[in-house]
């Protein structure tokens, strides 16, 4: 196949990360893949695709042109996967990902869950990471670390330094898939912040539960390995009318 992805911006984002990872996976299966962009060169990730820097996309033609990376084919980089984890931190480091300005991420519910768990005497460090600077409404006094715009390698190192993740978003995200691959047990989406906080309390209080969730997460994360996703993506693209 000859495939071209269109990227108007190359700043780090879930969309750009997915497009680059899909492109690399398809290149690995022998396809020619280009990324046409009106943005600047990417500095936060290496890429095996051919890059085209253009003023607009009007002249872009190819066998397959993708204005958006196909949904449901997110890829976790191999470096994120761990076969075992290091000794847990004390207090534990709990990760909360996503831009608070994006309502779909439900970051406010993540903060609410953390506050609920702390009300019931759970001690942990809350580690925030976002592609953007924090909004004015974020309760930054509840955060021990705030990271902005991390590169792929930096994000991997951060995940490997954490012990668990709060995943409040309704749609399963790439960051949650990466966390499972990294061996982080997840307190995942519930109907509200209190229920999510109760789930977090259970997770933080029960070492055996964390171990079970960690093993289950590793098994689930295998579906997002590049080789597994690339085969499904290839079948999807070749079956398009």
Image (spheres, rainbow, N blue to C red):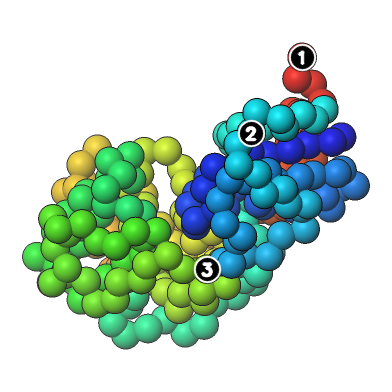
> Under tag 3, what secondary structure?
loop
Measuring 31% from the left and 66% from the top, which residue is drawn there? 128
Look at the image and tell me whether residue 37 can be seen.
Answer: yes
Q: CA distance from mark 3 to mark 1?
A: 36 Å
| Front label number (2 vs 3) | 2
Q: Nearer the viewer, residue 56 or 46?
A: 56
Locate residue 64: give its quadrant: top right
> Under tag 2, what secondary structure?
loop
| Front label number (2 vs 1) | 2
Task: Read off the residue under disc 2.
Answer: 57
**Tag shown at residue 134:** none
Q: How dense is the environment of label 2, judged by Cα within 10 Å: few (below 14), some, or many (20 and up)?
A: some
**Mark toward the start of the polypeptide (3 vs 1):** 3
Locate residue 41: give its quadrant: bottom right
Q: CA distance from mark 2 to mark 3?
A: 27 Å
Please state the horizontal and vertical placement of residue 123, each as a whole percent of the image.
20, 76
> Under tag 1, what secondary structure?
loop
In the displayed structure, would residue 31 be above or below residue 76?
A: above
* Image quadrant in which the C terminus is located: top right
Measuring 87% from the left and 34% from the top, which residue is drawn there? 1
Measuring 37% from the left and 83% from the top, which residue is drawn there? 89
Q: CA distance from mark 2 to mark 1?
A: 22 Å
Task: Read off the residue under disc 1.
Answer: 241
In the displayed structure, would residue 140 be above or below residue 229?
A: below
Locate residue 118: give its quadrant: bottom left
Task: Read off the residue under disc 3.
Answer: 151
Please state the horizontal and vertical placement of residue 183, each as a whole percent of the image.
53, 66
Please state the horizontal and vertical placement of residue 49, each as a whole percent of the image.
77, 53
**Mark toward the start of the polypeptide (2 vs 3):** 2
């Amino acid at each position: 196949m000859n495939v071209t992805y269109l990227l108007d911006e190359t700043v780090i984002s879930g969309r750009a990360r997915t497009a680059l990872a899909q492109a690399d996976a398809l290149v690995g299966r022998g396809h020619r893949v280009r990324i046409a962009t009106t943005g600047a060169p990417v500095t936060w990730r290496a890429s095996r695709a051919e890059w085209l820097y253009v003023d607009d996309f009007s002249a872009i033609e190819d066998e397959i042109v993708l204005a958006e990376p196909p949904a449901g084919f997110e890829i976790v980089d191999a470096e994120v996967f761990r076969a075992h984890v290091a000794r847990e931190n004390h207090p534990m480091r709990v990760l909360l990902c996503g831009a608070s300005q994006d309502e779909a991420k439900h970051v406010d519910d993540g903060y609410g869950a953390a506050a609920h768990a702390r009300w019931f005497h759970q001690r942990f460090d809350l580690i925030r990471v976002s592609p953007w600077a924090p909004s004015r409404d974020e309760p930054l006094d509840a955060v021990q670390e705030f990271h902005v715009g991390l590169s792929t390698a930096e994000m991997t190192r951060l995940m490997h330094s954490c012990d668990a993740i709060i995943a409040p978003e309704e749609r399963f995200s790439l960051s949650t898939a990466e966390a499972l691959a990294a061996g982080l047990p997840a307190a995942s989406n519930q109907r509200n912040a209190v229920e999510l906080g109760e789930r977090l309390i259970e997770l933080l209080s029960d070492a055996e539960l964390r171990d079970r969730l960690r093993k289950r997460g590793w098994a689930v994360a295998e579906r997002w390995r590049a080789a597994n996703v690339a085969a499904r993506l290839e079948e999807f693209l070749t079956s398009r009318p």
